[in-house]
Image: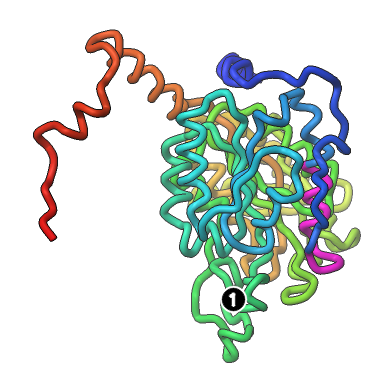
Amino acid sequence: MTETASVLLSLVPKAEAKQSMKDFKSDQEVRWCPGCGDYAILAAVQGFMPELGLARENIVFVSGIGCSSRFPYYMNTYGMHSIHGRAPAIATGLASSRRDLSVWVVTGDGDALSIGGNHLIHALRRNVNLKILLFNNRIYGLTKGQYSPTSELGKITKSTPMGSLDAPFNPVSLALGAEASFVARTIDSDRRHLTEVLRAAADHPGTALVEIYQNCNIFNDGAFEALKDKEQAEEAVIRLEHGQPIRFGSGGSKGVVRDPATGDLTVVTVSAENESRILVHDAHSASPTTAFALSRLADPDTLHQTPIGVFRSVERPVYDTLMADQLDAAIEQNGKGDLGALLAGNDTWTVVG
C-alpha cells in the first residue's frame, strides 16, 4: 500500500471489533435468477469487506439501475440505489464531501457504458477516491435480453433480431483512454482472483475500475465459457502479474511479445529464439500505452487470449484531496463563506410569473 493510500484509509474510522463475512450480510432476501454470476460476486465482496477493518457505517455502496444495482440492499452497510447511469456522479459528490467514507460503485455494462458513459469517464479522469465494480455480462438482463454496449458484433437479441451492428466497447480500453489510474479485469467464478483484484483496488488511492465478467445464465448464458472451462481457459486466459513475464498456455508455452515492425503486441509460441523478447508486465508504468495494447489482445467475439488482472496501477493526485486543499486555502485567505450572502448577491435572477 502506498503512503497516499494509507493516509486516505486513515480518514475512514476503523471497526471497533473484529468482523466476519456474516457482519456484511443484510437481512434482505437476495433476488437474482438462480445461477446468476451476481451471487458469486456478492459472496466475494462480503467475504472481503472484513479485511478492510472499517466501520460498516462508514462504507457506502452506490448503484445505478440494472440487476447488479440491487447490490446495496444485500450489503449491511450504507447504500443508495440511485439513478440510471448516474452512480459515479452521485458517488463523486459523496466521496468529495465525506472523506471519512469508503465509497464503492456497483454498475453494469448497460448502466455504465450507455446512459452513464459520460459520468464514468469523468470520474475516471478526475481520479475521485472511488472503487467502481463494473459487472459485464454483455447483455441487458433486467429488461429481458436486449443487446448492450459490450455485446459482440452480430449479436442476435430481442432488440437485434438480425444481429447487432454496433462495435462493442472494451471497458478496459475505455478506462485506460480516460486516464484511469487503476484498471483491472477479473471473472465472477474465480473467487481467489476476484478477491485479489478487490484487495488491490481497495488499496489504491483514487478511482479504481474493476471490470468483472459476469454470467447471465438466462439471457446470455456461456458468454465467458472459454475463460471458465478448465481446458479452454488454459489457452484463453492470460494472467497478468506485475514484474512477471506474460506467458500462458500449457506449461507457459505461449507468450506476449512486441512486434518490432508495428509496435503492436502479439502472441507467439515460446522458443529459445524469442524467449528473451517475452514482455514483462509493468502495471506501474507511467505510460498507459502497453496496458492499452494488452487490453486489445482479446478477440471481441470469442474472447480468446483474454488478459485478466491489474492492467494499470499508478499514483496521481486524488480529486477529493485536491478539492479539500483548495477549500482549506480559500478559508485561510478569505474566512468562512456566507451561503446566504452568496444567494442574495448580485449574480441572482428574478423570475416573474
Q: Which residues are magenta?
A: 32-45
Q: Which residue position holds label 1?
A: 147
Q: Nearer the viewer, residue 152 or 266?
A: 152
The correct choice, above or below, for 176 with respect to 64 in the image is above
Percent x, y of residue 121: 45, 48
Locate residue 136 relative to residue 344 in the image: left or right. Answer: right
Which one is in front, 299 or 155? 155
Q: Is residue 351 left or right of residue 52?
A: left
SS type, badge 1: loop
* Left or right, residue 333 beside residue 112: left
Q: Give the residue displayed 57% in from the left and 20% down from the top.
A: 8
Label 1 is placed on what type of residue? Tyr
Rendering coords of residue 337 (x, y %): 27, 20
User: Residue, x 78% and y 49% (percent of image)?
Assistant: 42
Q: Is residue 168 left or right of residue 319?
A: right
- The total of numbered circles placed on residues is 1
